Image: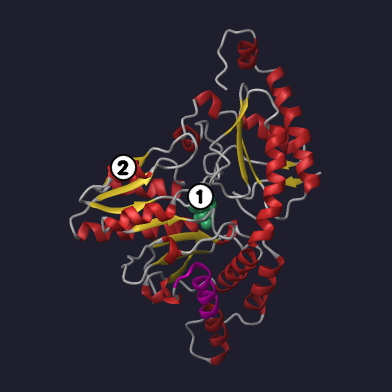
Amino acid sequence: MFVYADNAATTAVSKVAIDAMMPYLTTTYGNPSSLYSFAQNAKEALDEARQTVADIIGAEAREIYFTSGGSEADNQAIVSMAKLGALKGKKHLISTKFEHHAVLHTLKALEKQGYEVTLLDVHEDGVVRIEDLEAAIRPDTALVTVMFANNEIGTMQPIKEISEVCHAHGIPFHTDAVQAMGHVPVNVKEMGIDLLSMSGHKFHAPKGVGVLYAKRGLPLFNIIEGGQQERGKRAGTENIPGIVALAAALKESVDNMEANAAKIITMRDKLFAELSKIPHSKINGSLEHHVPGTVNMCFEGIEGESLLLLLDAKGVCASSGSACTSGSLDPSHVLLSIGLPHEVAHGSLRLSIGEYNTMEEIDHIIKVVPEVVAYLRSISPVWEDLENGKRQHLI
Ligand SMILES: *Cc1c(COP(=O)(O)O)cnc(C)c1O
């Protein structure tokens, strides 16, 4: 059996998205900047996609900028607010320790350019505390950026409360909503979000297309210079097929959100209930304030990498954290940020399921994970020490 349980890394493109984009690859392939009528169809498709995305998040079409993905949107949002702040003498940026690297590495680059960055702690439940944010705000704070939902442990942040604190201090608020879009309701007006990033391939659109929402009046600075596309804020011929697919996939996800969530949560709860029967295992973060599909657990005494390889051999695609950190031997910064000791963080497994998964697939995971964990423990010197009391169990 083959089970794809890594939907937080990427998703399959939906049939609706493929059908929507196909004409723009084959027959209606004009460049929307061209003036002849043949290209106007592409221009209309672009306008329509922009309106669809805007309507879904409670924005205006002119507040939507198409990008190459979530990373570019994060970069542009943060760099823009940093530069805007600097013009007013404000060079302090606030974020959290468990952001995606698209945010953390952008902040690091800005630090090298003379900005100061405060990264908020994330508590054991995977949620940032408002008091910590309030304490970190300074008169020279130029931006607060806090992710909507975490990509490794799935916990959601109190976005509305965070935006209220930011606005009380006149600070723009950006959120990386890549893991939330299409899975939970997101409304920029109701939630007070000034800038928001999303990525198509996390909700069944193709890879390489994303969105930056920036509230009207907030100046954006270019990351990509060139032509006048995206109202001069993002040069490069628009990825029309990708953009059309993104809008179609997002609409499909939002239209089916409740039914999908109900199905996914039923599968996730069974998965968690069964896997938590494995002795010395624990959920990372908590299942409260959580996107439906992501479960992250640790199993003491084993290596996450070995676990993944053996699961792969049994047909299960999972992750030990973010795809961006796999290949490195450092444990995930997300798991360390919620207080996991190094040796426990190493034994972590992220299963992220979606509406395309079936209960049969969940049953397969429930069967193979305990077998693989038991096998790895049987050959683990660390587990032996834990069992004969030479080391203390941490969970
Ligand atoms: C996947 C992801 C990104 C990056 O999006 P890309 O479109 O792959 O560049 C950024 N933030 C989060 C939280 C993600 O999960």
Q: Which amino acid does label 1 sit on?
A: Ala
- Highlighted range, magenta: 47-59
Q: Quadrant of the N terminus?
A: top right
Sequence-first tag of 2 and 1: 2
Above or below 345: residue 26: below
| Residue in the image at 41% along x and 40% along y | 97
Residue lying at 49% horizontally and 85% vertically, measured from the top left: 34
Q: Distance between the residues labelled 2 and 1?
A: 19 Å
Q: Is mark 2 within 8 Å of ligand 1?
A: no
Q: What element carries label 1?
A: loop
Label 2 sits on a secondary structure element that is strand
Residue 29 position by quadrant: bottom right
Q: Nearer the viewer, mark 2 or mark 1?
A: 1
Query: Where is the C terminus found, in terms of image quarters?
Result: top right
Residue pictured at 54% horizontal, 53% vertical: 179
**Is 51 contained in the magenta span?**
yes
Query: Residue 348 lies in what quarter of the image?
Result: top right
Any magenta on residue 323? Answer: no
Q: State whether residue 142 is above or below residue 270.
A: below
x and y percent of residue 88 in the render?
19, 59
358 left or right of 250 in image: right
Which residue in the structure is indicated by mark 1? 149
Of residues 74 and 364, which is closer to you in this image?
364
Q: Do the residues labelled 2 and 1 touch (CB within 8 Å)?
A: no
In percent of width and height, residue 325 lies at: 52, 39
Q: How packed is label 1: few (under 14 Cα within 10 Å), some, or many (20 or more)?
A: many
Nearer the observer, 182 or 287: 287
| 144 relative to 205, above or below | above
Q: Which amino acid does label 2 sit on?
A: Thr
Density class for disc 2 (Cα within 10 Å; few <14, some 14-19, many ≥20) is some
The residue that mark 2 highlights is: 118
